[in-house]
Amino acid sequence: MAMSTSNFDWNHAKAFLAVAQTGTLTAAAAQLKLTQPTLGRQITALEEELGTVLFDRVGKRLILTDAGKVIAEQLMPMTEAARHASLFAASQSDTVEGVVTITASDIYAAHLLPKLLAKLKGKSQNLHIKINAINHVEDIRRREADIAIRHVRPQEPELFARLIGEHIANFYATQSYLDHYGQPQTLEDLRYHQFVGFGDEEQVISYLQERGIPITAENCRFKTESGLVGLELASQGLGIIVMADIVALNRPELVRLPLPIDPIRFPTWLVSHRELQTSKKIRLVFDFLSEALKG
């Protein structure tokens, strides 16, 4: 098992490590933003270069062979070295130009960031902003984004997080929905209403039940993983939705329900890698968002 260093293809190594970490071509392809056939070809090419089999297929998963485990251990330090080199290079930039990637939920990406970033436009004409509207948490450590807007404080010690403050959510519906189903006056009334569910439905229902709201999955006739789609469903009169006030108040078709319950409060964190805090372009965007999101 040998390979000339002059012929080493780092793309093959990245493909191999992604599959080793995720266990499937599907997950690894999504992580690397490649097609499965392309990823499969890269794994095959690496196996041919090394002259050994790196994975065994067990059901739908790919499991490292003994040789694969050795190769993975040898490549991991190279991956970490490349990541730190990239972070160091980014942190040394003295110019406010180039690309800054922000990741946020699709709701925040669509309803908050465009208005805020319009105000940032005049601060640097050479700055390019890329927005990843993704509801799952992207890995800042792997540079999938430079800045993240999150509602849970990250635990990784290499990440820098600033608590911007609390946002508030309430129950909203259209007037047409309320005209048809009636205005709920008590929490018990909600038992007989339709809800639009989005995100982790089981977790949301459990949270609402703990707050004395007697709904089940049967109440959620319309559901989606996307908060943005959920907002549109509610705006069409298809049910009640729990939505952040800073979003819902910009939708005049939605009416806040005057229920006898305290608003739902959730924190908003702005997150970046600690080493990137010395990058002027990222620091500019980070500080701007920190102040803008407080309002």
Image (cartoon, helix red, strand yellow):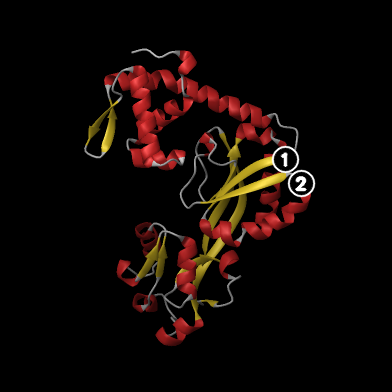
Above/below status of 126 relative to 273: below
Front-most of 214 and 159? 159
Which three-letter amino acid code belongs to the residue tagged 2? Ser
Separation of marks 1 and 2 at Cα, in angstroms: 7 Å
The residue that label 1 is drawn on is: 97
Left or right of residue 251, residue 4 in this image: left
Mark 1 or 2, nearer chain start:
1
Front-most of 3 and 72? 3
Would residue 21 be seen by someone viewing this image from the given angle? no
* Horizontal and vertical percent position of residue 30: 42, 43
The residue that label 2 is drawn on is: 124
Q: Quadrant of the N terminus?
A: top left
Callout 1 crowding tier (Cα within 10 Å): few <14, some 14–19, many ≥20: some
* Horizontal and vertical percent position of residue 148: 57, 46
Above/below status of 208 relative to 39: below
Left or right of residue 158, residue 90 in this image: right
Which three-letter amino acid code belongs to the residue tagged 1? Glu
Q: Are marks 1 and 2 in contact (CB under 8 Å)?
A: yes
Residue 145 location, quadrant: top right
Q: Quadrant of the C terminus?
A: bottom right
Q: Name the disc covering residue 37, or none.
A: none
Residue under the point 43% across and 81% down? 184
Find numbered disc 1 in the image and state the secondary structure of the residue it sits on. Answer: loop
Front-most of 238 and 163? 238
